[in-house]
Amino acid sequence: MDCLIWGTGKCAQEIMEIHGMGYFREHAILAFIDNNKEKVGKKYYGREVIFPSQIINYSFEKILICSDIYEKDITEQLVNGIGIEKKFIMTLNDLENDYYSELVKKNYLYSKFLIIGDERLYKQREKSYTLLFKICGFLDIHSIGEIENYQYDYILLMDLMNISCLNRTLGKMKLEKEMIKFISKKYDIDEDIILTDAVFRSISSVEKKYSFGEENEDKTFLIIQQTSRVQGLGGGVLRVAHFVAYAQQKRYYPIVDMSIKSQYLEKNEEGRINAWEKFFMQPTGYSLQDIKKSKNVIIVGSGPINRKQSSLMNNISLDFLKMQPWVESQVIKYIKIFLGKTDKVLGVLFRGTDYTNTRPYGHQKQPELKMMISKVKEKLLEWGDFDRIYLCTEVEQAVECFKNEFGEKVCFYPQKRVQEDFNGRLSEIRFKRKNDAYHKGADYWIVLNILSKCHSLIAGKCAGTTIALMLNNGEYKNKYLFELGRYGIDD
């Protein structure tokens, strides 16, 4: 199928990064369309950018609109302004549905896959992979030479952009192309059977329907699963918030399932304890135990939220969250300690470790410590003096540097922190204390709640910042968020 793509902005870039080596390996892109005269005539992903009026010069089968916000306006321009029939227009929802249909038709779901990627990430996400594919083996970049020892139908490249030894400056599409060419030539393998993680993204975001009995026939339950040790509590809460909003639109009853491979479970708790219920109540009071024999159950796995789901997720909020009693009592206690005697507290969120060490592809870049301290000094002059500076960080050296710079004004929650030279992920670290997995999550949620009650905010963009802003509900008198781009995309 020959396609024209409308858009050359962030949305189009995201679609190309995801589907450039997936859907568009088999469907040709003829050109990109844009109303911006400064972009027309230039190249975008190797194709010419044209004006909408030039569409008639092309023989195409579909025009893909790469925009969530302006989809209706662009459709109107195409239909009423240019005379394109609606049957030739493809939305982002249509793209995801079409690609998923192709994957099903090709029996990808029933084939044997050899996965090549980051061994550490594979082990952390193994459960979510095996729920979707028949895995015949895994090879990391260093053991790729063993590829001839496996019998497989397809090879699936996973998370290449998060493997530090690869040349990530190439960009996702170019890196995937280079890897496919290398594997194909080196081991005499047909390029058509080497797939990228767009396959996983498409399949893993699809809802799976089950019936476990005849109970609760008047209700449909939506189980929101998390099957990754990598995802932190902040990202997990935001994902749950999105699906709770979705469930409300669809009149489903949401239930959160964090009982498999969560970093907030001790090893002897996996499969027995739901980590979500360590910190929060279930959104509607129903638990996994309550629906064991229910007739209508939908499960959404740990894959990304698809466009169809996203379109129904209005009014995202954290109003559904109800903390477990001990967590709530600690929040109240420390808000009184840090904020009780003054309303002039500057909240600062500084992230290190996972972000600055691993530079996860597509995540927001975080400021360096010197940059953060410099910005705090600047904003103290601009916003006026503060009685206290509440520092929210997991890095011990950041606490020491802030104390050296700002003295007794600095306050912070007494959580366990890592040293500056720690080069792994927070999900991997274990502190020597009883119930460490629980306290890691509880501490995280407590410090963010305190941050949300501060007078003003300075922070890098991350899940924790988003949560603090949502809990704050627009009450910050001043705020500054670093705009540094995304790792691997804006480098």
Image (tube, rainbow, N blue to C red):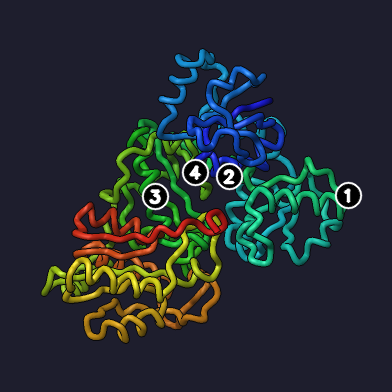
- What secondary structure is found at the residue carrying circle 4? helix
Position in image of residue 47 (x %, y %): 65, 36
Q: Which residue is mark 4?
A: 10
Q: CA distance from mark 1 to mark 3?
A: 44 Å
Amino acid type at mark 1: Asp
Residue drawn 55% across the image and 59% down it: 491
Q: Which residue is mark 2?
A: 201
Q: Toward the viewer: 255 or 226?
A: 226
Amino acid type at mark 4: Lys
Mark 3, other Cα within 10 Å: few <14 / some 14–19 / many ≥20: many
Q: Which residue is mark 3?
A: 240
Q: Is label 1 in contact with label 4 (beta carbons under 8 Å)? A: no
Q: Quadrant of residue 390?
A: bottom left
Dot label at residue 188: 1
Which comes sooner in the sequence, label 3 or label 4?
Answer: 4
Q: Nearer the viewer, mark 3 or mark 2?
A: 2
Q: Is residue 92 visible?
A: no
Position in image of residue 314 (x %, y %): 33, 38
Amino acid type at mark 2: Arg
Q: Residue furthest left?
A: 341
